[in-house]
Amino acid sequence: MSEISDHAVKQVENFSQTLTLFNQDANKTSKDSFFIQNQLFSSLAKIDHILYKHEAYSAVLNDKVTHRFVDHTECKFGKWYYSDGAEFFSKTQTYKMIDEYHHTVHRFVIENMKYVQESTHNTKEIVPIILENFIKIEEASHKLFESLDHMVLEQQNIDMASKKSAS
């Protein structure tokens, strides 16, 4: 009877250890999945803005606006930024900086589209303004893209630190 009892205790202990390891692996997988999800969303936001800028360049070069150019609160990323983005990333320092860069991209694209719609984009007075606006757009895009990457990493560091303090 004692042998059976000892064997049962060892089996339960082994099972308990297996469950603990499984739980740790599941938690790590969950954290990794969240990080990958954030990286993917960041990449999609970048692609959306590359396409947005492409449409702006095309409008200037082709002398017509064929795309709806929305402000920074109306694009997919802007809507996310003020809802789920705020919920998940507002604890990061980088989150707070992103809005300025994002706003700048949209502001100067919309300004350039106004010139195209008015058919003044090829005039001697406006061409330098449009070129300067595109320079501002590209600089802000670069900062926005870097900030998105940094924000995701910063959030991962916050999550890891909170996990360590909870342990």
Image (cartoon, rainbow, N blue to C red):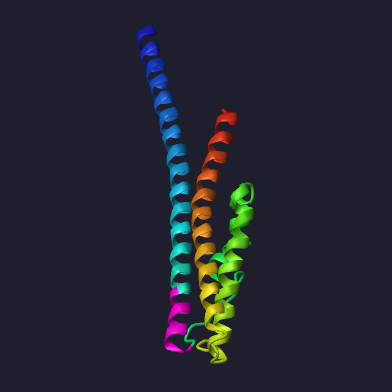
Residue 31 x, y percent position in the rendering:
47, 42
61 is higher (above) or lower (below) than 134:
below
* Residue 79 in view, yes or no: no
106 is higher (above) or lower (below) than 163:
below
Magenta residues span 54-64
Residue 86, picture quadrant: bottom right
Identify which residue is drawn at 55% across, 90% down: 120
Quarter of the figure that contains the C terminus:
top right
Residue 126, picture quadrant: bottom right
Q: Along the horizontal axis of the image, is 17 left or right of 111?
A: left
Viewer-proximal residue among 164 and 52: 52
- By secondary structure, the bulk of the magenta-drawn segment is best described as helix
Residue 119 x, y percent position in the rendering:
53, 92
Magenta stretch: includes residue 57 = yes
* Residue 40 in view, yes or no: yes
160 is higher (above) or lower (below) than 102:
above
